[in-house]
Each structure stands twice: as C-alpha cells, then as structure tokens.
Image: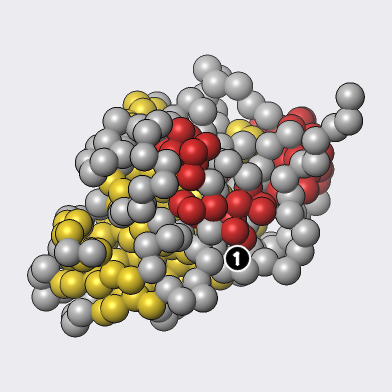
Amino acid sequence: MDNENKKLTPMRFLPDVKQMPWGTAEYKLADLGFVDSMACEGWLKGNSLSDIMQTYLERVVGETSFNWYGTQFPVLVKRLTVKGRTSLHITTDDETAEQRYDAFGKTALWYVQEAGADARLYLGFKKDVTAEQFYNACQDGSVSALLHSVKPQPGECYLITPGMVHAAKDVTLLEIAEGSELWFRLYDWGKTDRELHLEEAFDLIDLKRCNISASQGNTLATTPQFTVNRIALDQPLKSHRDEDDTFLLYICTRGAAVIQENGTNYNLRQNDVVLVPAECSDFFLLPAEKDAELLEVRMDPREENDIVSEPVEE
C-alpha cells in the first residue's frame, strides 16, 4: 500500500450480504477474516479494512483501541433483515473467549429499524431458571415459556450482553457489536438441520431473570467495547478532537447528512456507514434533510490492561 504517510480521510466501505435461513445479514463494516470490508471511495479505494489496519494501525482507531485489539478493527456493523426467526443463541465475554477459543468475545447493541406484525425480541429469561429446567425445555420444545420477550418498536435499542440468550423474529435490526462472530446456537425452534452448541456452551448461559428494557435518551450504550450515541442532527455540529483518541463511526438511521472534512463532503443516506479515522481532528456534521438522525460509535478510554495476548517465547 503506497502513501503510508498521507493523511487519512473518512472512509466508506462496500456492504457484504450473506443469505441466512431466516433472512439476510448485510455486513456494513467488518474485519472478521471471512468478511473483510472493502473501501469503495477516496484514495484508499480498493483496499480492505484489514489491510488498512495493518498499515495505519492506531492512526485509524486510536491508541486505546490498538492497545486492546491490535490490528483488528474492534467493531462490526451489520443490518439484519429477519423474515423468520433466528436461532436462540448466546455470546461470551472477552476473557472466556480468549482462554477457550483464542478469540474476542461479543457484546452487541440491537437498534430496531422495522418491526413486522409478528415482531418479537427474545432477551434472557422472564424469571430465574435452573440449568436442568433450561436443558429439559430445549429437549421438549418448551423454551418459549421461559423466555423474556418484547414486541419491539422502531427506534428502540437493546444491549445484548455475554451469556444472555437472545433471538429475533420478523424485525429489521442494526447490530453494532464488538468485532467478533463467536456465538453459540442453543435452540433452533425444532429445526434439526443446523448444528447446536448447547452442551459446549452450557456453562456460559446466564440463567438469572432478565429485566432488560429499551435504552432511553441520547446515550444508547456505554460499554468497555464501545459507546453509542444518538444524534438528532437539526443543526451543524463541529467536532473538536484535541484530546480524542478514538475512531468514530457514523451510521445514518433517518434522513440524510454530510460529513465535511478538509473541504470534502461525504454524504450519508439512510443505512450508510462512514468511518472517521482517529487522526481526522476537525470536521463538521451537517444535516442534509431536516429529520436527519445519526448513531455515533466510538471507543472511550479503558483503564484495564489490554487483552491482546503477549507473544509466546519460542
């Protein structure tokens, strides 16, 4: 890759659509190996996200992210169009994922874009259950009776934490998550054609009652893995990055907007994602339509030691 000292600019990437038994998963931004987003405009057009990370490191993501995740981009964004019902599955935390699978764990935020007549989100258990109760329910098909479920509405957000059983039905979601696809299928609603991981992941399940509700206000999630803010863009905003140490992702969820950086405009229509590298210090967010709304994704400073494994001495 040439021009290694050239200043980075905001980046847009090509989506990668995967057909699923329940609908489609459109990867808007991902550095996962089997999905590696490709820059589609600007002087880095044609380069993959993993190549960009390998070359520009903390200039893309900032030192906090680089110290934790190394050369892997730390966040993925995908759009899930669920026509049927996803399997019931869980994710795990970073520590367990590293120890058992040499991978990152996964925390995720689900932002509801559309909800059909039969829309449901299954999020944890409605009351404390025992391991025996859940296992037996998976065998006899009575799992639904144990699950906490909600009828989602567009604009609602739900934080999916490691160990929380979860599934979605008849809904379109934006998923903002830690850059990992390590998850475990526990139950598939009677289907027998896909592998289950119930025994493998049984000790990872959070069997406690779940009292999750939709996120309120402008701060939708604050986790060690990412922070997500909702911006109602009714007037121009100027970003000052004097002491900022993070990449910024902007996802347009309504209307249209413009990121203006160093005299260049980067347009965002609904569902567009733009990555603003950490070294882009000053830029404007401009509304292109009066009802524009953006989600801003960032990584705030973390006090703990990093989770990137130390190299093993030969």
Is residue 123 visible to us here?
A: no
**Residue 158 sits above or below residue 181 on the image:** below
Residue lying furthest right in this view?
A: 314
Residue lying farthest to the top in this orientation: 193
User: Which one is nearer the viewer's eye here, 133 or 49?
Assistant: 49
Residues 20 and 177: in front is 177
Q: Residue at x 23, y 76 (%)?
A: 233
In the displayed image of the protein, which residue is found farthest to the left? 289
- Residue visible at 34% across and 43% down in the picture: 28
Query: 29 or 143, which is in the foreground?
Result: 29
Q: Disc 1 marks which amino acid?
A: Thr
Q: Which secondary structure, mark 1?
A: loop
Percent coordinates x, y for residue 59 in the rendering: 48, 53
- Tell me the quarter of the picture where residue 148 sits: bottom right
273 relative position to 214: left or right: left
- Write the residue at 23% across / 64% down: 262
Q: Residue 205 at what x, y percent from top left?
A: 73, 47
The residue drawn where x is 36% and y is 48% is 6
Quadrant position of the N terminus in the picture:
top left
The spot of residue 174 in percent (x, y) is 37, 52
Question: In the image, is 136 to the left or to the right of 165?
Answer: right
Q: Is residue 207 visible?
A: yes
Front residue of this view, candidates 126 and 310: 310
Left or right: where 278 falls relative to 270: right
Q: Is residue 92 left or right of residue 36?
A: right
Q: Which residue is mark 1?
A: 223
Say few, some or many: other residues with alpha carbon within 10 Å of mark 1 (under 14 / 14 to 19 / 20 or more). some
Is residue 181 positioned above or below 314 on the image?
below
